[in-house]
Structure formats: C-alpha cells, structure tokens
C-alpha cells in the first residue's frame, strides 16, 4: 500500500494538485494513519512468537543467528519496525504542521499562496489569511 501511495504523493506535490479531498492535508493525514496501522500490524505480526494469521510462525529469532535465513528474517523484522517509525514520524510532522498553520483543508503541496494557485487567486493577500482565523 505504501508503494502505491508514494507515486500519488509525488505527483500531487510536483504538479501542485489542489482539487479534491485527497489532495488536502486532512486527506494526507487519513491516508498516513491507515498506512500507520498497516505498518504497525505487519511489524507486530512479524515480531510475535505466535502469529494468529499463519500456522507457521518464525518464533524467537534470538537462538538462530548462525543461519543465514534467520539473519534475513531478523533484518526483515527490523525494517518493518523502522518503516513503522518512519510513517509515524511523517504522520506526526503533518499533524503538527496542520495544527500550527490551521491547514486542514489547504492543498497538500504546502504552497499556500502561489501566484498560479487555483484555490487562492492572486488578488488575495496576507490579510485574507488573517481573516480566516
């Protein structure tokens, strides 16, 4: 899911897409929360010694580091947790930005008042931003 989300975000930011709910910061936060849950569940299942999803579990990987396969599985678990931490950091950063700037419905590309913006025409000034508060 993350690999599908990345090209969409790159396209949204580089082409300054502004139309639709998914191109707002709130849409980004909802999507990041869904990815956060996916990464957390995946890392927890990979770490657990008894997985409810599959009948064959990896078990405790601490005893088998002399085997190449076990080292690969240990690295996979570590990268699962690092991916979860990265998605959590992205979610937290976006949340703090939205809270600080009251940018919940603003375009995700972060350029709040570009000259070529569809959402904020050129005639609007910083006084418009102050009146929104």
Image (cartoon, rainbow, N blue to C red):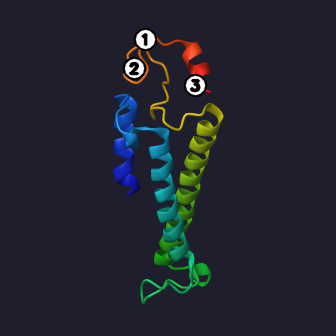
Label 2: state its secondary structure: loop
Q: CA distance from mark 3 to mark 2?
A: 17 Å
Q: Earlier in the sequence, mark 3 or mark 1?
A: 1
| 108 sits to left or right of 126 | left
Give the residue at mark 2.
117
* Residue 90: mark: none
| Residue 92 sits above or below residue 82 on the image | above
Q: Nearer the viewer, residue 105 or 132?
A: 132
1 and 2 marks in contact (CB < 8 Å): yes
- Residue at the location (49% across, 29% down)? 110
Give the residue at mark 3.
132
Quarter of the image containing the N terminus?
bottom left
| Residue 122 sits above or below residue 4 on the image | above
Label 3: state its secondary structure: loop
Q: Position of residue 84 (x, y in %)?
A: 55, 59
How many C-alpha atoms fall within 10 Å of the one at disc 1: few (<14), some, or many (≥20)?
few
* Residue 122: mark: 1
Q: Nearer the viewer, residue 80 or 63?
A: 80
Q: Earlier in the sequence, mark 1 or mark 2?
A: 2
How many C-alpha atoms fall within 10 Å of the one at disc 2: few (<14), some, or many (≥20)?
some
Nearest-to-viewer mark from 3 and 2: 3
Q: Position of residue 46 (x, y in %)?
A: 51, 74
Q: Quadrant of residue 100?
A: top right
Q: CA distance from mark 3 to mark 1?
A: 16 Å
Quarter of the image containing the C terminus?
top right
- Residue at the location (58% across, 38% down)? 98
Q: CA distance from mark 1 to mark 2?
A: 8 Å
- Residue at the location (63% across, 41% down)? 96
| 41 sits to left or right of 11 | right
């Amino acid at each position: 899911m993350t690999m599908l989300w990345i090209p969409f975000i790159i396209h949204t930011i580089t082409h300054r897409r502004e139309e639709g709910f998914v191109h707002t910061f709130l849409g980004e936060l909802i999507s990041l929360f869904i990815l956060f849950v996916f990464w957390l569940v995946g890392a927890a299942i990979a770490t657990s010694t008894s997985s409810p999803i599959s009948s064959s579990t990896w078990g405790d990987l601490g005893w088998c580091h002399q085997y190449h396969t076990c080292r690969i599985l240990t690295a996979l678990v570590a990268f699962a947790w690092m991916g979860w931490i990265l998605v959590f950091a992205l979610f937290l950063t976006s949340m703090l930005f939205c809270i600080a700037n009251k940018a919940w419905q603003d375009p995700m590309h972060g350029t709040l008042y570009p000259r070529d913006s569809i959402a904020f025409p050129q005639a609007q000034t910083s006084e418009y931003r102050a009146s929104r508060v």
